[in-house]
Image (cartoon, helix red, strand yellow):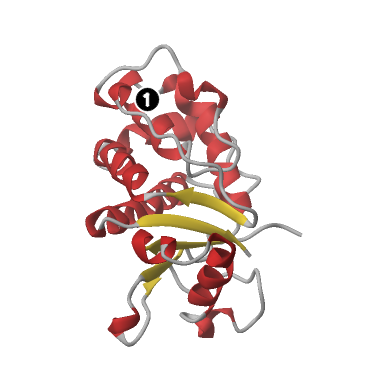
Amino acid sequence: MGICIDVLIVDWDHLMSEPSDQHYGMLHDAGFSVGEEWWAAGPGHPSPIGPQWFWPSPSALGWFGKYDFGAVGFSYKDHFAASEHWEAIRGFVPPAMRSAVDRFIDPLFWGGLEYMADQDSEGAAAHVSVVLPPAPPDHLLWCPPEAASSLKLFWDLVGTQLEALQEPFERYAHAGSSRINSFDAFVGLLRGWGDVIGQAQQRGWGVVGLRC
């Protein structure tokens, strides 16, 4: 059985005001409180529609938002598959773009990427690093606000140049064996993470990924 991921953006001050041993329960309850109609089929089932945000109601409870990746991205396996595709194509991507994508996806995708401390870094991304603290148990991602701000710098570079990845992806990615089976699916996942990071950064919030 695979692992699915619930992604929330979070008012970090609000979260940190609670004891650390209560964080998971607090976040789990928050995520479960929104969008329940799409998960009526049971844990691990994808949403029947595309990516979307869920926000608490009333707005006075608005210390978090939940991002649903939709049919592609609800499973953590999809993120791992995307990182494997990136590993296959990154050698054919211009260095500045490669460096920016490396640093954007490394904290977000399963296991990190061994070449993150690459020596061929170029461009603005070469001068920014993102080091996340270890994720607590049952968390797949633990990204404080300062890290989200740095990731937004990378997304500003990556998000405007995604077309540069299409030819390398279509030539070198082995995309037939997963739901990330096309360039559109690959960049759709990247755009989803770009949206998550952008929404968090503009509020000064952090990002968490819960194992579900």
> What secondary structure is found at the residue carrying circle 1?
helix
Disc 1 designates what residue? 99
Q: Which quarter of the image is occupied by the C terminus?
A: bottom right
Does residue 3 lie above or below 175 as drawn?
below
Rendered residue at 35%/81% (across/down): 61
Question: 8 or 47: which is nearer to us?
Answer: 8
Seen as rendered, the residue at the extreme right is: 1
Q: Position of residue 7 (x, y in %)?
A: 48, 61
Left or right relative to 131: residue 75? right
Question: 87 or 113: which is nearer to us?
Answer: 113
Does residue 94 lie above or below 191 as drawn?
above
- Whether residue 172 is visible, yes or no, is no
Left or right relative to 77: residue 65? left
- Whether residue 155 is visible, yes or no, is yes
**How would you rate the neighbour count of disc 1 (Cα within 10 Å): few for under 14, some for 14-19, many for 20 or more?**
many
Rendered residue at 46%/25% (across/down): 90
Q: Position of residue 49 (x, y in %)?
A: 46, 73
